Image (cartoon, coloured by chain):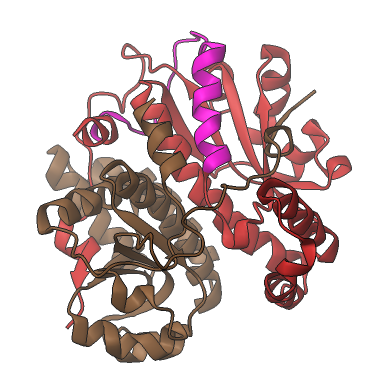
Chain colours: A red, B brown
Amino acid sequence: MMLHTALNWRYATKRMNGRRVPDATLERILDAAHLAPSSYGLQPYSIVVVDTPELRERCQPAMYHQPQVVEGSHLLVFATWESIGNAEVDQLMALIAEERGVEPASLESYRHTIAETVARLSTPEARHQWAARQAYLAMGMVLTAAAMERVDATPMEGFDPAALDEVLGLPERGLRSAVVVTLGYRDLETDWLAGLKKVRWPRDRVIVRAE
Amino acid sequence: MMLHTALNWRYATKRMNGRRVPDATLERILDAAHLAPSSYGLQPYSIVVVDTPELRERCQPAMYHQPQVVEGSHLLVFATWESIGNAEVDQLMALIAEERGVEPASLESYRHTIAETVARLSTPEARHQWAARQAYLAMGMVLTAAAMERVDATPMEGFDPAALDEVLGLPERGLRSAVVVTLGYRDLETDWLAGLKKVRWPRDRVIVRAE
């Protein structure tokens, strides 16, 4: 029940009040992202945390000057890996072997399956799209975790990815932004959306039964 | 804390024990999907619930005979809308106007913004990719909700979308499958993955700081 209370409480906050999300709260929200599942467990993205006011100000033009960028306290930039190939698959196999105490050779058929999937992602765009889906899954968990902490979170797709990447130096890290979440606290005085009814399609348009 | 306990408890269950998820529990999990945010609030997907053993058996070949399909009790097929255009945008405006008791004319600038975005999605593939991201976000909330209900949920990308769509009659509904979640309960006797340590990249590979 607490989950549904939280999901009803959350909304795409348009104006925030400048109060900073405490470090411990932020870390719990990020834990949810870290635990998110992903295709084959490859987690082909990083979450870039932007928390100084100076750097958020520098990001703002690339975010089309939306006020949450500076009125919130943190940006979480979900950024896909530019490189998704055999090197990353081998790193994952080494990690699994170490964490579970098994021989790498015992993972050979698993490695082969992942390598085949990854090989089919033959263009940078295909890799980005695939990785972005995984990032959106993690974003769903972040939005849920934030709501349960009573932290406001605004998912933002309206930005100039190339400009944001440049401000944050993402290309040098092999990263490319896919979507942003701003964390902070709603400003009930200024947010026109704060008091409005949540709107969703009728439940039977979203949830349908197979016959 | 309860959230993190749930996210640590969950894993991509490979074998399930046939026990059925109670209807009330299922509905609470689906509520989380229904409340998921989406780009502009357009929710451009449906979640097709497959719950009879007969129909799940018929789906199994398209799911490459993975056992969870019949050992779980429900498939949730996240399926994107084939049609995402002005008609859907107008429907959304009518819904918002009604739910919030405002004049449709007051939403004109919002309608225009969405219509522009949607118009840029000029191919069926572009629409599917965009809608699939939104569906993955909702899937993140479903996986979280299921874990908090102590229901096992396996996200599944390994299936033949065209074959599954045909079995379920999705083209006739204007839908196209993007990803599947199976719900059920883990079988600790037969699931080789049940006892294994969860593996994630080191936290500082997933969570990085902007400088």
Q: Position of residue A207 (x, y in %)?
A: 21, 63
Q: Outermost residue toward the top?
A: A19
Q: Position of residue B57 (x, y in %)?
A: 28, 87
Viewer-closest of A203 and B94: A203
| A154 relative to B44 in the view: left or right | right
User: Split into 4 quadrants, where in the image is the C terminus of chain B?
Assistant: top right
Viewer-closest of B173 and A192: B173
Write the residue at 72% across / 14% down. Answer: A54
Is B57 contained in the magenta span?
no
Q: Which span is picked out in magenta?
A: A8-35
Q: Is residue B87 above or below residue B7?
A: below
Q: Outermost residue toward the right?
A: A172
* Residue B157 is at least partly visible in this image: yes
User: Split into 4 quadrants, where in the image is the N terminus of chain B?
Assistant: top left
Write the residue at 41% across / 90% down. Answer: B61
Viewer-closest of A70 and B61: B61
